């Protein structure tokens, strides 16, 4: 990076306390500036050390070298997942625990709400003290969801961004050190595709990966609760959901296929009209 383009504007997040980080209060200064005028490049905060491409790239390169040395004698291909897990995995697990709390409150809140509603029915078995407990539980669940939802998604997205930066830095370093044979086997388009398309999948992956282990447990718990509430019809509802999965998967594949054809058609049409416009221009001139 050109040093003349650098500016010194440290992020307030470094000096923010726990409550400020939890409520994102440290972002108010830049919001106030954006409310008064259009934001400029100098208004942007500097990235922290753990977000710099040099730091992340060096960390991933160090772990990758350990991984390649481990597998060079066995003849197996090293895995990029293990170096990424050693760098980001433990933090990501903590955010998974945070998501577990949120999903637990999502399940518990309707149960407490049903108890509160039963208090207002005729000949209700729920006492006034119990109704206060149900109401407090509903409010507490909403409070937990408010303070776990956004921190989780912000946290996993930041991990995804750091993974993208680390992998992009590693790809860039590798592209500068390619041998003559490597340059003949690797095209510029492949490198650009890795940097622009492949690394962007970290965003969706990091957001949804925790649902792989939370989702099945959540389904089982909800099924048990529905069985206790309404009996066998609960199973029929779940069977409909599961039976709809294969058709939805097939429809998704068809949409992906025809979307590719549609994009290809647009490219051909765009190229055709461009050539036609150039021909008309040459004829007129």
Image: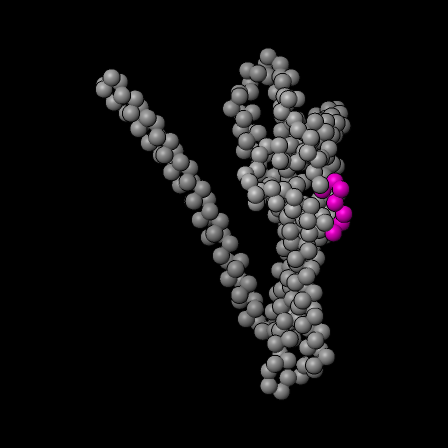
Q: From what the image shows, is residue 275 above or below residue 162?
A: above
Q: Residue at x 46, y 52 (%)?
A: 247
Q: Nearer the viewer, residue 68 or 55?
A: 55
Q: Residue 200: percent from the left, percent from the top?
A: 57, 36
Q: Most extreme residue toward the front, as rendered?
A: 36
Q: Is residue 84 visible?
A: no
Q: Nearer the viewer, residue 57 or 213?
A: 57
Q: Residue at x 64, y 75 (%)?
A: 116
Disc tally is 0
Q: Nearer the viewer, residue 279 or 238?
A: 279
Q: From what the image shows, is residue 274 above or below residue 245?
A: above
Q: Is residue 101 visible?
A: yes
Side of 153 where 129 appears, left or right: right
Q: Residue at x 68, y 49 (%)?
A: 25
Q: From what the image shows, is residue 41 above or below residue 241?
A: above
Q: Most extreme residue toward the left, as rendered?
A: 284
Q: Quadrant of the N terminus?
A: top right
Q: Which residues are magenta?
A: 13-19
Q: Quadrant of the C terminus?
A: top left
Q: Residue at x 70, y 57 (%)?
A: 101
């Amino acid at each position: 990076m050109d040093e003349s383009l650098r500016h010194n504007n440290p992020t307030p997040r470094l000096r923010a306390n726990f409550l400020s980080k939890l409520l994102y209060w440290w972002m108010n200064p830049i919001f106030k500036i954006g409310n008064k005028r259009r934001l400029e490049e100098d208004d942007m905060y500097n990235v922290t050390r753990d977000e710099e491409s040099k730091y992340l790239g060096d960390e991933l390169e160090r772990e990758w070298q350990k991984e390649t040395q481990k597998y060079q004698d066995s003849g197996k291909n090293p895995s990029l997942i293990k170096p990424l897990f050693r760098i980001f995995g433990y933090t990501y697990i903590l955010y998974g625990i945070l998501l577990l709390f949120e999903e637990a409150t999502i399940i518990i809140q309707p149960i407490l709400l049903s108890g509160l509603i039963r208090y207002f029915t005729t000949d209700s078995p729920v006492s006034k003290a119990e109704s206060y407990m149900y109401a407090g539980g509903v409010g507490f669940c909403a409070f937990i969801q408010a303070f776990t939802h956004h921190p989780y998604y912000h946290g996993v997205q930041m991990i995804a961004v750091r993974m993208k930066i680390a992998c992009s830095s590693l790809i860039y370093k590798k592209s500068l050190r390619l041998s003559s044979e490597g340059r003949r086997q690797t095209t510029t388009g492949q490198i650009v595709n890795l940097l622009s398309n492949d690394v962007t999948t970290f965003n969706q992956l990091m957001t949804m990966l925790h649902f792989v282990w939370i989702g099945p447990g959540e389904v089982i718990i909800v099924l048990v609760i529905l069985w206790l509430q309404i009996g066998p019809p609960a199973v029929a509802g779940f069977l409909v959901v599961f039976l709809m999965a294969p058709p939805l998967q097939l429809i998704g594949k068809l949409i992906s296929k025809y979307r590719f054809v549609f994009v290809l058609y647009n490219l051909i049409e765009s190229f055709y009209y461009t050539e036609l416009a150039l021909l008309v221009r040459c004829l007129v001139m």
